[in-house]
Amino acid sequence: MSLAEQLSEMGFEKNQIDSAINIGKAANMEQAIDWITTHDNEITSGATASSEPVLTLSSSDSASATAAATADAQVEANSLKCDECGKLLKDADAATAHAMKTNHSSFSECTQVIKPLTNEEREEMKKKIQERIVARRKEQQMADEKRAIDMEKKRISDGKTLLEIKQKREEDEMKKIAEANRREKLETQLAKQRAIEKIEADKRARREKAAAEKSGGVVGDVPAVPTAKPQVATVLQPTRQYDECNLQIRLSDGSTIRHTFKAADRFEKVIEWIHQTHHTNPFILVQNYPKKEFNESDNYKSLNELGLVPSGSLMMKPLTHFQT
């Protein structure tokens, strides 16, 4: 029985058998099974053409071979043997496949008979083949699932990294705005302090002058000569007046919104604008630097009174226990 017939009895299709013998160059049952299980997805439903020509005996050659076999019935060749490796081959097809795979070219006839598979051995081989096919498919499925999980993990990781970068950029921007507000308020306070000191100095000079005029400018018998005080020219820095307030507000979902209000607008107008444009749940607004939490009493104060002019940075804090 040829290799193709054995594979056909084991339940393999013709295109699988042709692919294993012609393309896979299988010389025995084990090689053919390995080729079929490994390249099962690559084998098409149609018959696969051989990449090498297959030699067949013509009818005249068959008649001559039959006549020779009849004439020499006492010496009958039951198999072929490779003279280079000693492998026992069943027929000329197996010898051809062996030669193409190993490049061996010397063969001789042999009287030894290759024992055919019994029904039990054939069933056992079928069972092993099915188990091998199931195992290969399971390994492929597990590899595909692992690849999908790795891709999903990478997507999540990349998303978290981008979100962290965005949050860090927004926090840095809010810190810069808060620092600019702090410096501007400090400069305003210093200018006010210098103005107060100048006013106090002027008042003190007027009081001393009035006291000297009242006493007549005489100390004992010697007229007191008033000492001229050097006039120090103090240049007051003009206080900048702002009519607008630029607010940056960070929502509870991490996004940032910006809007320009008038400096005289009440704080409640900011609350109403957020409700109208974003339809959010109940919340309060807090300031990170300097730390401050705005309550209902601040709603009637202007943005200028709350120190949010010319710009400010606020954060939204949801009210988790809100009662209607």
Image: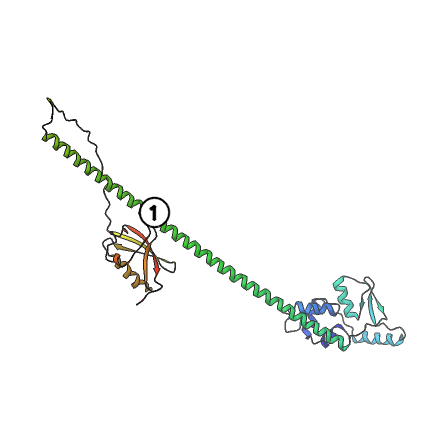
User: In which quadrant of the rendered image does the N terminus lie?
Assistant: bottom right
**Nearest the camera: 14 or 275?**
275
At label 1, counting other C-alpha atoms closer than 10 Å, the crowd grade (few under 14, some 14-19, many 20 or more) is some
User: Quick one: which residue is furthest to the front in this view?
Assistant: 220
Left-right relation of 142 to 73: left
Left-right relation of 150 to 114: left
Q: How is the image coloured?
A: rainbow
Q: Which residue is mark 1?
A: 179
Identity of the amino acid at label 1? Answer: Glu
Q: Position of residue 16 (x, y in %)?
A: 68, 72
SS of the residue at dot 1?
helix
Left-right relation of 209 to 143: left
Residue 33 visible in the shown view: yes
**Nearest the camera: 319 or 87?**
319
**Nearest the camera: 259 or 30?**
259
Task: Say which residue appears at 29% left-offset and 51% top-offset.
Answer: 311
**Quadrant location of residue 145?**
bottom right
Q: Position of residue 56 (x, y in %)?
A: 76, 72
User: Quick one: which residue is furthest to the top in this view?
Assistant: 221
Q: Position of residue 28 (x, y in %)?
A: 75, 69
Q: How many numbered markers are drawn?
A: 1
Task: Say which residue appears at 30% left-offset and 63% top-offset.
Answer: 275
Residue 53 visible in the shown view: no
**Nearest the camera: 231 or 152?**
231
User: In which quadrant of the rendered image does the C terminus lie?
Assistant: bottom left
Q: Is residue 221 above or below residue 176?
A: above
**Quadrant location of residue 85?**
bottom right
Q: Is residue 95 above or below residue 284?
A: below
Q: Position of residue 91 (x, y in %)?
A: 79, 71
Task: Say which residue appears at 46% left-offset and 58% top-offset.
Answer: 160
